[in-house]
Image (tube, rainbow, N blue to C red):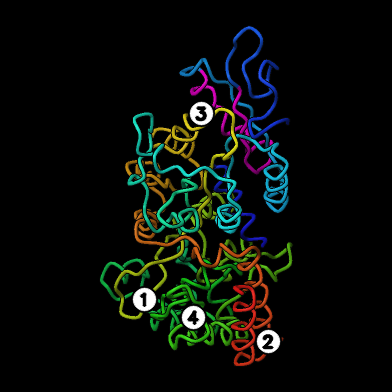
Amino acid sequence: MKRAAAVLGILAIAVTACSGGGGAPGVPGSGGKDAAGGPVTIRWSAWGSADDMKLYEPLVKKFESEHPNIKLKLEPVAKYEDYHPKLLTQLTSKTAPDVFFVGDDNIGKFVSAGVLTSLNDKLSGPDSKSKPEDFFEGVYGGAKKDGQIYGVPNDTNPEVLWFDKQALKDAGITENPADLYTAGQWTMAKYLEMGAKLVKAGKSGSLFWNWYGSTYSMIHGFGGKAWEGGKFTATTDPKAREALQTLAKGYQDKTFVSIDLLPASNGGDTQFLKHKAGFYAGGRWVIDIVKKGGDLADYDIVPFPSPDGKPMSGAVAASYMAMNKDTQHPKEAFQFLTEFVSKEGQMVRLKGGGAVPSVKGAESVVLDGYPEHAQTLLDVRDNGFANYPEEVAVPGLTASINEYLLKVWQGKVPVDQGMTELQKLVEGKLG
């Protein structure tokens, strides 16, 4: 949960009465036109701090200057963990904003609740600045159901492996992971071999947040499948089970370290900057960590390894821009949504930020010279996957899986027993 809140917070950065956008017509600032026939007010919400919200100001100013008939009213929520419960309550009571962010671990709940506008026709229509095909299919995740789009990825963070060249050198590792990947030799066997050398040298192999991104990327790296045909297969698919068993063993011997369990005074960021670990699983947001306390030249990125060294599908954290089904101003609300997620909108919002555009054509935002292999972020995005629709459709399921696996990683539950109990837990929630 800590990692999800942190990363989706970065995605958000990079990122009343009758109904949503509510208020009675004729009341200034309520969502309807004022008595003098003034502009429509579109309420929108996102999570993040006051400083985070300031990053939206250039885009808001630009939008309002180009659309004098629309005023935007941002309603922020500081903490990610408070955001979705509040939004769901607002939607239930018909007081929700017109447009709002939804995290990838919550989007399925909102789709199932029937509170979001289907956007297919609007995205394909003449007023759209962001067509459905402008976005990568795998990143839609739980925002698409039965062919209908209920949320548009506003930006992403592909999960990659940041590596510390100095830590690898200290452990006697002379091969560069990015060079191995380019040569088609970045295999799971090679990655685990490096992990063992790092541990032998008194370091940690890899620092992982306990979330689906790293866990499922490892499963894919073994050639396994976490979900298939609508069923949870992470504990039954032989390769997936092997990945989980390897993780469980690795968490016991420091091949893998759960950042969630580290003390704040010596967390994952600190250990990585002090060359105490070879790899740190994260997205583009890690750039900010390195810039604040490290030597940029010491760090680079590589995708998660695969069984044979060929590129594979990796996890992509995403958040979505959705539209209230009950908005009183669907035309104006969509105008804001489509421009916010458009190529131009993302380039304004994400330049110099910690996220990766979700839309095609804005790649220059990422390819600004750092890290050396920044193209890797785009490669993972292009072929990656947001959390599985089947999983995010069940409220709390992702959190329950993560929490249970953490017990297995800590050795509180034997691996085989853990696999059996995890399967029962998931099937029980699926009903």
Separation of marks 1 and 2 at Cα, in angstroms: 26 Å
Give the residue pinned by disc 4: 233
Q: Residue at x 39, y 62 (%)?
A: 384
Q: Give percent across and percent down for residue 44.
A: 61, 34
58 drawn magenta: yes
Separation of marks 2 and 4 at Cα, in angstroms: 22 Å
Q: Give percent across and percent down for residue 329.
A: 55, 27
Mark found first going from the N terminus, 3 or 1: 3
Which numbered mark, 4 or 3, is in the foreground of this view? 4
Mark found first going from the N terminus, 1 or 2: 1
Secondary structure beneath label 2 = loop
Which numbered mark, 4 or 1, is in the foreground of this view? 4
Q: Is residue 149 above or below residue 326?
A: below
Mark found first going from the N terminus, 3 or 2: 3
Mark 2: which amino acid? Answer: Gly
Secondary structure beneath label 1 = loop
Give the residue pinned by disc 3: 59
Secondary structure beneath label 3 = helix
Kindly indicate the quadrant of the structure image that contains residue 30: top right
Name the one closer to the observer, 43 or 239: 43
Magenta region: which residues? 41-64
Q: Give percent across and percent down for residue 14.
A: 52, 42
Give the residue pinned by disc 1: 306
Kindly indicate the quadrant of the structure image that contains residue 405: bottom right
Q: Which mark is residue 411?
A: 2
Mark 1: which amino acid? Answer: Ser
